[in-house]
Amino acid sequence: MNTFTVVLIVILLILIAGVVALYFVGKKMQKKQEEQQAQIEAYKQNVTMLIIDKKRMRIKDAGLPQAVIESTPKLMRRSKLPIVKAKVGPQIMTLVCEEKIFDDVPVKKEVKAVVSGIYITGVKGLHGNNTVKKETKKKSWFKRKVEKLQEKAGAKPVK
């Protein structure tokens, strides 16, 4: 056999072994995530809170309890998490927010949040607002002029 074909066969076997290993590890991780999601759903409760501040910061710098820091995996300790400081009742708490709703959380406003332990899973506005909307940015002078010109020309505005 040619040495080139032997090298290709060895590389192919290594790649197949890697894919099989990733498949089983992924399946195990998916089961673990489903169990965690079921646990979050079991302990969730609605809480009224005043959001003081929100930032993305490392778990060591966030001011979370030491037990939480010790229970996180080593790799997650260096990554930045969405952290929310909120006044719940008479005390100020540091909570971890879900990534997909972090941008929708308003600062310095009172909201009804769905909380499971120290994890915020949902936010609804208080005083009649069903959902909290992001603040829209004010358009620059140039973009306003371009939209006016496009409107005069009959073209659709660029979004």
Image (tube, rainbow, N blue to C red):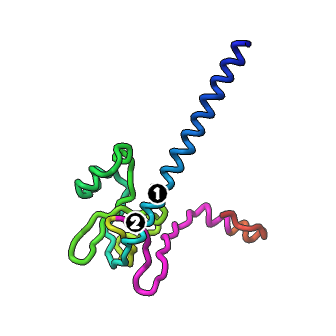
Considering the numbered disc 1 on the image, is that residue within a helix, a strand or a loop? helix
Determine the image quadrant of residue 36: bottom left
Tag 1 residue = 33
57 versus 97 height, above or below: above
Query: Is 9 situated left or right of 47 in this image?
Result: right
Residue drawn at 48 percent across, 82 percent down: 130
Observer-nearest of 86 and 10: 10
- The quadrant in which the N terminus is found is top right
Let me know if residue 5 appears in the view: yes
Q: Given the image, on which type of amino acid does mark 2 rest?
A: Gln
Magenta stretch, residue numbers: 119-147
Q: Quadrant of residue 65?
A: bottom left
What amino acid type is highlighted by mark number 1? Gln
Q: Residue at x 63, y 23 (%)?
A: 10
Q: Which residue is mark 2?
A: 39
Residue 35 covered by magenta stretch: no
Q: Is residue 148 left or right of residue 102?
A: right
